[in-house]
Amino acid sequence: MTDLSPGASAAPTAAHAARPFTLSDFDFSLPPELIAQHPAAERSASRLLDGRAMEPTDRIFRDLPGLLREGDLLVFNDTRVVKARIFGEKASGGKLELLIERVLPAEAGNPGNEVVAHMKVSKKPLPGSTVHMAGGRHAGGFDATLLSRWPTEDGPLFRFALHGPAGETPWQLMDRHGHLPLPPYIERQQNADHDPDEAEDSERYQTVFASKPGAVAAPTAALHFDDGVLAALAARGVERASVTLHVGAGTFQPVKTENLAEHQMHSEWYEVPLATLAALERCRQRGGRVVAVGTTTVRTLESWAQSGQATGDTNIFITPGFGFKVVDLLITNFHLPKSTLMMLVSAFAGYAHIMGLYRHAIAQQYRFFSYGDAMLLERVKAPSKAGF
């Protein structure tokens, strides 16, 4: 486990940059009381740890506009969290839960009612079986037929065809019968017998600019933005653009292999619109900086830069040594130990520097994870961004 005790060195070193990393390097001890169970009273009242310099500075999130420059480009993920968690039962009466990860596009053989989901059940039903969700179709809910595993015959997810009232889409079924899929470390989790969906979560576990439904988790760094901060950024001359990455449940999964090369990264769908590609080019032409709001935005922009594809699926795995081509600054929350996101921010700002910032955050009682506080990071200056 990485030493986050006071006094441990926070300075980036060549040795840190050169040596191979293992899973244990990204483990640390976090006091459970620092895991935020509720959002701050106001979005922009969250704390902001300014980690651009060697010595961290404690700020408030609404200070952000003053930390950026005229001509910078702020890029958001405009995905919208859907009510993807749905409870039901098998024909035998056994309870089960689906977390719908993706609605598949209508195509030959799929009239538009097929989805891909995680399934929590004591004994998995066989392909061809029908399960009854939200009471089943006969009781005002809907039925779901298990077609196969996904994306391969031994894949981790399951492909279902949903059968509700005529003409009702999977999106409508989720909206009517589903629950907001809060992260597993937020303790007020839904279950089949108790529905603690709170008005607070319905509003605050969405960004103020969420528009493209499809995520099962929020792009949490963007939760801190409100109308006041956005207006102040515009007044400062900071341009805004958006991408879409539908965040999957895999974002919460810890890496389980000590050898990072053995980890199988989850896949998520992304899109970089033409308007955003044009904004990126204008930013470079005027010498501005690209500021990514959240790790999902980083993964989207760097996937595009790496593949040349403006839309598609990405399973990009960013670890120390990765050559960033697009992003200059990153606004991000504090992440779980042993997570791929800890590896991403360490690749971005330097491993030793990130560990120093986490030491500081724990000592100063920052709030962690989805409803927690944020930090502002600057990309380490090597390797070169030539080729953007």
Image: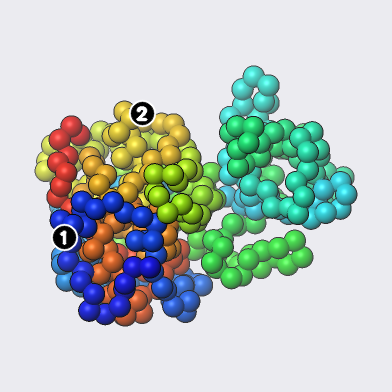
Is the residue 40 above or below the residue 129 in the image?
A: below
Circle 2 sits in a helix, a strand or a loop, which is it? Answer: loop
For the residue labelled by badge 1, is the local secondary structure a helix, a strand or a loop? Answer: loop
The C terminus appears in which quarter of the rendering? top left
Residue at the image point whose x is 39% and y is 61% from the top: 24
| In this picture, residue 189 sits left or right of residue 315 | right
Q: How far apart are the alpha carbons under marks 2 and 1?
A: 35 Å
Q: Residues within 10 Å of mark 1 (few under 14, many from 20)?
A: few
Q: Looking at the picture, how far across and down is residue 50, in whole percent?
A: 23, 67
**Residue shown at the point (32%, 40%) measured from the top left:** 301
> Image quarter for residue 330?
bottom left
**Quadrant of the image occupied by residue 128:** top right
**Residue at position x 39%, y 57% in the image:** 23
Point out which mark residue 242 bears.
none
Q: Is residue 266 left or right of residue 15?
A: right
Instruction: Name the quadrant of the N terminus.
Output: bottom left
Mark 2 / mark 1, whichever is N-terminal: 1
Q: Can residue 214 be seen?
A: yes
Q: Nearer the viewer, residue 315 or 191?
A: 315
Q: Position of residue 245 (x, y in %)?
A: 43, 43
- The residue beneath circle 2 is 309
- The residue lying at 31 percent from left, 44 percent from top is 241
Left/right placement of residue 338 relative to residue 302 reads right
Kind of residue sitting beneath label 2: Gln
Which residue is identified by label 1? 13
Q: Amino acid at mark 1?
A: Thr
Of marks 2 and 1, the one in the foreground? 1
Categorize mark 2 by other alpha carbons within 10 Å: few (<14), some (14-19), many (20+). some
